[in-house]
Image: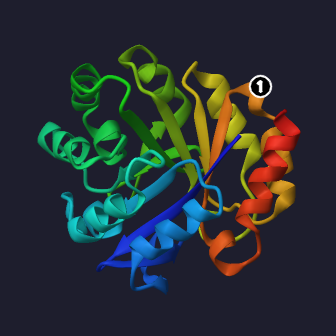
Amino acid sequence: MLLIPAIDLKDGQCVRLQQGEMDRVTVFSDAPEQMAAHWVAQGARRLHLVDLNGAFAGKPVNKAAIQAILKTVGDDIPVQIGGGIRDLETIERYLDMGITYVIIGTAAVKNPGFLQDACVEFGGHIIVGLDAKDGKAATDGWSKITGHDVGDLAKKYEDYGVNSIIYTDIGRDGMLQGINIEATVKLAQASTIPVIASGGLSNMADIDALCGVVDEGVQGVICGRAIYSGDLDFAAAQRRADELIA
């Protein structure tokens, strides 16, 4: 079970949003690269970056902060990023910068042909971000709820060569209400693509529950507000997960 600290970027700062709303923001650091170094020191084996401005703008915005993070962590651990990725050129630039995995969200739902092209061009480096409310995919920075069932989308992506799917229950994101285990497992069972849980992680009980569904195809979890607020000790949580999976 891979625990992945999230570093959400808005206006060059490390922040957390509640339910994806840009006006419900808490700033945790003016130096995201220092936050990245902190999580690496705590034992993180991967980092999850989100360009929040980019998600709404439809193009990368926080380039300087991203470069600073990559310079700080070097080759120590892989870094994945999402937010505003709409074309192959953007993916190529990110990979050239040192990003390991690029997350395609809105574009994967609206333009599956683009996702397929990305997987062909950059095999092994593409993650799909499926954000959902009541099982229906959300797009455009969560501002639009589509009629697409996330399980149907995951099944369609099976043959594309997607590395994994990050599944976010947007009703729980940033609310510390607990991971939606049932919905996450349902999505994992809908296809052969490994799933990374996201949205609502709050305490060690969530870690225990996630470790209990590893065999169902859930391979990791994005850690956000809980590790910033102190509700969950990241290093202790990763040790706990390692013990349970060993």
Pinpoint residue 91: horizontal percent, then vertical percent: 22, 41
**Residue 89 position by quadrant:** top left
Residue at left 87%, top 40%? 244
Residue at left 18%, top 39%? 92
At label 1, the amino acid type is Asp
Pinpoint residue 104: horizontal percent, then vertical percent: 34, 42
Furthest residue to the top?
A: 159
Label tally: 1
Residue at left 32%, top 22%? 123
Say which quadrant the C terminus sits in.
top right
Pinpoint residue 208: horizontal percent, then vertical percent: 86, 48
Up the image or down, 224 lies above or below 88; here it is below
Up the image or down, 192 lies above or below 194; here it is above
Q: Which residue is mark 1?
A: 215
Helix, strand or loop at label 1? It is: helix
38, 106: nearer the viewer = 38
147, 13: nearer the viewer = 13
Say which quadrant the N terminus sits in.
top right
**Residue 62 position by quadrant:** bottom left
Up the image or down, 203 lies above or below 93; here it is below
144, 116: nearer the viewer = 116
Work out whether residue 58 can be spotted: yes
